[in-house]
Image (tube, rainbow, N blue to C red):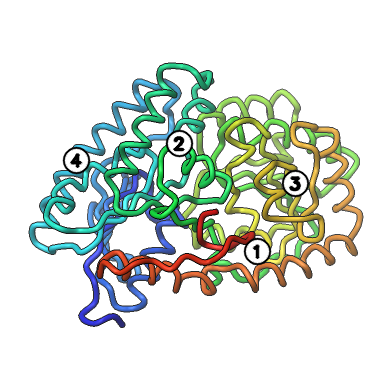
């Protein structure tokens, strides 16, 4: 435990129990004796304040996942920024935090930490999703639009306000460094799987073959392609099902697609569930599906769920995007051509019928996960926090796939 422990607060515009990345950081800090508060969203059913595994969770605003209109989306973000600034300032006045770890989306949430900043606390901005590309993809805006240019400016100002910036993959770090962030104040932490949550414990043995997707239901995730591909292979194969867990803007369209294809008894769209429940669901799947489109956002957005499938001993089919080709190869995942539902259907059929291939993928994936998981990387996060708080210089390491320092 560090001397006396540190007082740290995290801000995140999401549900704490469903955000694996935030949970990993918070749990790691509590594990070594730090005091951690998290300011987050509520789904309307949770208590405003709750202690979750030693982490003080303050839920200050309810969120509904129906944000198709960019102005409604922006209004809710701004409302959360104002409320989080007030709550954080009040907590900081009592706690005297030494570090504030702010998670995007949005980037400008970092300015909610203005009072801790001016009173000496160090600020980390954690870029989960690179926002100009995220916005352009979500609302179908061209890269040269005024909104996207404004978001690039906000990214630059937010990075300048922070003492250090964490980016969630190496491709995005290169892009952020080129336009917004100095290399010296940038570190990469991909979404390493937490083996204390995701470990094999299969309990199902009912003869069904279950394909699974868990996560956001946005266009870039390619769930419509996955459902159409599943339709091509499921009819001559009784007992095969496709389970989809999550919420997002495309859910009504996906439900309509399932009805139109007559797949109501084969494709099941379920609500989002807490991370610990997700781990049990993943462990009882037979095949994971990650069908992202290789567009401007999906092509470079790292999929945490891939390593969650791998950690649970579930073979996974993955769209051959730029980011997933960077981190994985054919020995650990079954790739298919992004956007090609026929190729995805072929991959589904291949792994359904080929137990030896499934076992080979699982075996090599286990070796990959043993080298690349949160237990092997969290000490680097501790080192980053301690270096920022103490004012000592970070000692960057060389770049390699899965390493933690930007190129």
Which of the two marks, 2 or 3, is nearer to us in this view?
A: 2
Per the image, label 4 sits on a secondary structure element best described as helix
Q: Which residue is mark 3?
A: 241
The residue that appears at 49% across and 39% down in the rendered structure is 178
Where 154 sits versus 4, above or below? above
Where 272 sits versus 131, above or below? below
Which of the two marks, 4 or 3, is nearer to us in this view?
A: 4
Per the image, label 1 sits on a secondary structure element best described as helix
Q: State the separation of the CA atoms marked 2 and 4.
A: 30 Å
Q: State the separation of the CA atoms marked 1 and 4.
A: 38 Å
- Say which label, 2 or 3, has the lower sequence index: 2
Which of the two marks, 1 or 4, is nearer to us in this view?
A: 4
Q: State the separation of the CA atoms marked 4 and 3.
A: 43 Å
User: In the rendering, at what x and y percent does residue 76 appear?
Assistant: 30, 31
Which of the two marks, 3 or 1, is nearer to us in this view?
A: 1
Q: Which residue is mark 2?
A: 179
Foreground residue among 405 and 64: 405
190 relative to 283 in the view: left or right: left
Q: Which residue is mark 1?
A: 283
């Amino acid at each position: 435990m560090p001397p006396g422990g540190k007082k740290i607060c995290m801000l995140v515009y999401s549900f704490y129990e469903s955000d694996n990345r935030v949970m990993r950081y918070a749990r790691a800090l509590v594990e070594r004796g730090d005091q951690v508060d998290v300011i987050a969203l509520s789904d309307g059913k949770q208590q405003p304040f709750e202690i979750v595994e030693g982490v003080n969770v303050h839920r200050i605003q309810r969120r509904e996942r129906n944000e198709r209109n960019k102005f409604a989306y922006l209004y809710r973000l701004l409302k959360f920024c104002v409320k989080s600034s007030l709550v954080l300032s009040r907590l900081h006045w009592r706690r005297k935090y030494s570090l504030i770890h702010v998670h995007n989306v949005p980037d400008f949430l970092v300015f909610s930490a203005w009072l801790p900043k001016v009173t000496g606390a160090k600020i980390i901005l954690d870029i989960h999703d690179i926002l100009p590309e995220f916005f352009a993809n979500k609302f179908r805006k061209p890269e040269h639009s005024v909104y996207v240019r404004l978001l690039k400016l906000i990214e630059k100002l937010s990075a300048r306000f922070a003492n250090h910036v964490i980016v969630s993959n190496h491709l995005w770090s290169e892009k952020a460094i080129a336009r917004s962030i100095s290399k010296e104040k940038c570190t990469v932490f991909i979404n390493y799987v937490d083996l204390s949550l995701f470990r094999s414990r299969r309990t199902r043995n009912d003869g069904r073959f279950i394909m699974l997707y868990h996560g956001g239901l946005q266009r870039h995730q390619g769930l419509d392609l996955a459902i159409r591909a599943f339709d091509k292979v499921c009819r001559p194969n009784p007992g095969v099902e496709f389970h989809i867990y999550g919420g997002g803007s495309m859910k009504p369209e996906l439900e309509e697609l399932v009805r139109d294809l007559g797949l109501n008894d084969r494709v099941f769209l379920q609500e989002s569930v807490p991370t610990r429940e997700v781990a049990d669901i993943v462990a009882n799947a037979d095949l994971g599906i990650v069908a992202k489109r290789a567009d401007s956002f999906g092509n470079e957005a790292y999929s945490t769920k891939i390593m969650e499938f791998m950690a649970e001993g579930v073979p996974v089919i993955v769209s051959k995007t730029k980011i997933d080709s960077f981190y994985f190869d054919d020995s650990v995942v079954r790739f298919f051509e992004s956007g090609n539902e026929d190729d995805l259907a072929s991959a589904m059929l291949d792994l359904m019928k080929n137990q030896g291939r499934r076992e080979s993928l699982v075996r090599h994936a286990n070796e990959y996960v043993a080298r690349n998981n949160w237990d092997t990387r969290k000490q680097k996060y501790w080192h980053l926090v301690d270096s920022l708080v103490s004012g000592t210089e970070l000692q960057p390491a060389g770049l390699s796939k899965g390493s933690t320092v930007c190129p």
